[in-house]
Amino acid sequence: MARVVRFLAVLVVGLGLLAWGGFRIISHTTQAWFEKDLTLRAQLAVNGARWALAARWASEDAAAIRDILAEITRDERIMAAAACTADARSLAATSEYPGQFSCRELGRRVRPNAAAPPDQWRTVGFDAEITGGNVHISVVPLAGDEGVLGFVVLVHDRAFIDRREAKVQELILIAFLILAASASLITVVAARLFWKGWTREIRSFLRGGPQRREFQPILRDVRELIERISAERALEGEGGAWTPRRLVQTLTEHLHGEKVIVLANREPYIHERGPDGALRVVHPASGLVTAIEPIMRACGGVWVAHGGGSADHDTVDREGRIRVPPGEESYALRRVWLSAAEEQGYYYGFSNEGLWPLCHIADTRPLFRREDWAHYQAVNQKFADAVCRETESDDPIVLVQDYHFALAPGMIRQRLPRATIISFWHIPWPNSERFGICPWREELLQGMLGSSIIGFHTQFHCNNFLDAIDRYLEARIDREQIAVTHQRHSTRVRAYPISIEWPNRWLADLPSAEECRREVFRELNLPPQTLLGVGVDRLDYTKGVEERLGAVEQLLERHPEFHGRFTFVQLAAPSRTLIERYRQLNDNVERLAARINQRFASGSYRPLVLLRAHHEPPTVFRYYRAADVCYVSSLHDGMNLVAKEFVAAREDLRGVLVLSHFAGASRELTEALIVNPYDMEESSAALAAALRMPVEEQQERLRAMRSLVAAFNVYRWAGRMLLDAARLRSKDRLFGRLSDASGRDLAGTR
Ligand code: ADQ
């Protein structure tokens, strides 16, 4: 109510000011007109009497001149008149002439300047006040045969002008009101008619009836709104929890049970043959696999990946397929074979020496080689072809994973224009200046824009991506829809923060935290009062393992009370060891661990345990459960699932997570102790605080983080992407129908 009153008050004041301003202008203009009119009249009157006046001027016949002046004042609007000589003496004046306007004073007015001779004099006019009212004075030079003789003064009645002015203003006001009333009336009638048609169209649209073309943009907005609301409802739905069942339901209801094809470089199950010839299945240490595998278990479909295991060939059928997971077969793994040269160029070279350091701010220079690029293109084409062979319809749902396949979306789109391609970029996206380092930046962006949706972990990375498009491609960016249109194809860009499965399958058969702790302590030969810290990573320079060990060293330096009591165990899965920078990292970490042990070891006490090997998930989870503190010190990380796994593992609500500010996970797990891993002071202090943290505080922090990871689990991550894909598909189908009906390509105008 107060708002309405405020609005009306502002409206009234605004209109008042407008009207006042309008009147000022009108009155000014009419006044100027009237004054001009008076001057003209005065000149006419004097000119009309000019010969008669001139004849009497030389003899200075005052009586005759007065008679002529009296004749002039017969005009009802001229009240009085006077005649003055060139040297400003009074010759004659009518009886009503007001004495206050002397010839001397008026003589000064007709001269443009003091020295101006009479032939330069000009007619002047001005308003004045006399007893009895306002007047207008005109002073008109009188010309004879021998030049200017003097001037005539005419006194006009201003009351007449004021009356006329008021009348004009009144008429203008009436015209204005009539105009405003007609305009309002027309607007109201038009709006009513339009509203009526509009609402009728919406009602008919909701009932599924025919739609008129001119209403299609409005109906499209309404449709989008309805879809968004229903998708949000489906997403947050009853019960709220996202489970494998709910994900499958979503797929069935919204995507008609469509088969999902995942394209990822890493395979979820690697078959290795040991030295004894026995076959072994390995779960790779990969955040991507951790996240996608539960989705495939739930939804079925095909996972297309590089077959890199030593026994991978021996376990597949002729098409390179094998049903997985072993013993619980629910989806197909389709292996693609790469030659050593292809793997070197595409995987180690372009992907991991080029794109990986390009996208991570961790002080390692990206290396771009032309031959790597050629392999990257060829291998992307090879995988894209494999995906197309796995499809059963012309509009499959394809989930393209990560930076290994920036070109594949465009290649798949070329063969299957109606496919729904969701690309997810698991690592950060750099700012556009850094991205510009890549010599094939345009090609990468074009390839990615073959996707229907491109996902990143954070909005920040989405924005960086849009900036890169803006800078390097001729494309239209719609910042409201967050979409890019390039060569008539539209791609949505969205943030989908990835997560882990909840409940976690690896926890189901795991012993209690106490038992895990006992087992780990036995394995590491630790005394029971030991405080245990743990780090779990692929050995990658972006994970900040060197910085982490530095923080442990400083903790022991600054806090002697932890000597002999604190042990940090680092599980480090060797990764990309063919690359020089990774070999260096390996050596550095080993050297650092040795130095710390040398400095602080005593008796059987070793402050640092480096377990440089791949560990199967049950072992990893056992360490999470055994630890007092888990330190994730990434220098730059898209998300980091280790942090979320630690939170999931701590059903006992014990333990503290110390988490790098530079991991995407720090945006969600705000109850962790968030640190800058480059700052040794801060991170070692955080480790000390974690080791001293009261149990109640540990419980409180973990409770909050656990409820977040439970609600925002990986099923929700996939569910949101699939719902968005479903919306796009129905929209595409609708547009397809509309364009068929109208013979126009509407899809291209989106
Ligand atoms: P990654 O860089 O692989 O993933 P991350 O998210 O930390 O990183 O996941 C690592 C996974 O490997 C975890 O599941 C962990 O348990 C496992 N792991 C780590 N060390 C291991 C070891 N020594 N032995 C066995 N398993 C180990 C990329 C991005 C991340 C993003 C994920 C998912 O770099 O930022 O979170 O994708 O999108």
Image (cartoon, rainbow, N blue to C red):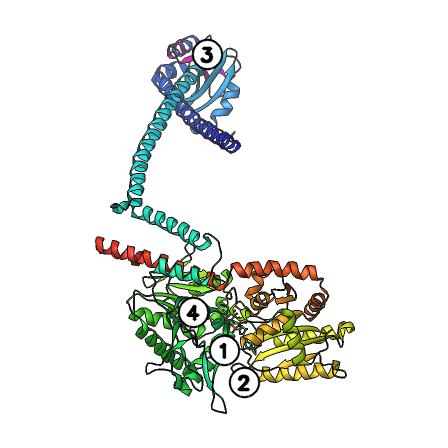
Q: Mark 2 points at which residue?
A: 580
Kind of residue at disc 1:
Pro
Q: Mark 1 points at which residue?
A: 284
Kind of residue at disc 2:
Glu
Image quadrant of residue 617?
A: bottom right
Tags 3 and 1 touching, CB below 8 Å: no
Q: Is mark 4 on a helix, strand or loop?
A: helix
Q: Does the residue labelled 2 lie within 8 Å of ligand 1?
A: no
Image quadrant of residue 15?
A: top left
The alpha-carbon separation of the residues under discs 4 and 2 comes to 36 Å
**Rendered location of residue 725, percent (x, y):** 38, 60
**Mark seen at residue 262:** none
Kind of residue at disc 3:
Ala
Q: Is mark 1 within 8 Å of ligand 1?
A: yes
Q: Name the residue under label 4.
A: 297
* Residue 76 highlighted magenta (yes or no): yes
Q: Can residue 115 be seen in this view?
A: no
Count residues near mark 4 (Cα–Cα under 10 Å), then give few for <14, some for 14-19, many for 20+. Answer: some
- For marks 1 and 2, the one nearer the N-term is 1
